Amino acid sequence: MRQKIIRINKPSIYNFDLILRYIKNSPSFVIEKVIETTYCRAFIIGGRTYLVLVRDEGIDSKYLEVKVIGEEVKNNQV
């Protein structure tokens, strides 16, 4: 499996822990999972399956880490 990790800016008022708590109690939890402090979801794009993992880099960080895993992950995708 190939993987690519990118960092995205998070808004200053963004609360990732609150989002994770909401997802754990949401009816969509069947397709979305929270493992410890990481949001996980599989996506099918163009007939290919990708696993996306999102985690907060920390309370003082301005970024979220997004990891995309799949057979067809390339530098110009995501």
Image (spheres, rainbow, N blue to C red):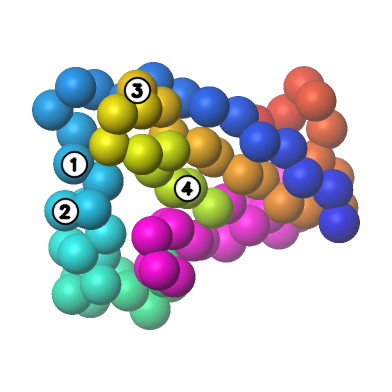
Q: Is residue 25 left or right of residue 47?
A: left
Residue at point 43%, 38% (across, down): 57
Q: Nearer the viewer, residue 69 or 10?
A: 10
Which label belongs to residue 54? 4
Which label belongs to residue 62? 3
Which label belongs to residue 55? none
Instruction: Tell whether position 15 is magenta.
Output: no
Residue at mark 3 to residue at mark 4: CA–CA distance: 14 Å
Which label belongs to residue 15? 1
Are circles 1 and 2 on residues that touch, CB within 8 Å? Answer: yes
Q: In this view, does 24 lie above or below 52?
A: below
Residue at point 19%, 64% (across, down): 21
Are circles 1 and 3 on residues that touch, CB within 8 Å? Answer: no
Residue at point 51%, 37% (across, down): 65
Question: Which circle's residue, 4 or 2, is located before the other in the chain?
Answer: 2
Residue at point 20%, 71% (across, down): 26
Few, some or many residues within 10 Å of mark 3 (<14, 14–19, 20+): some
Q: Name the residue under label 2.
A: 18
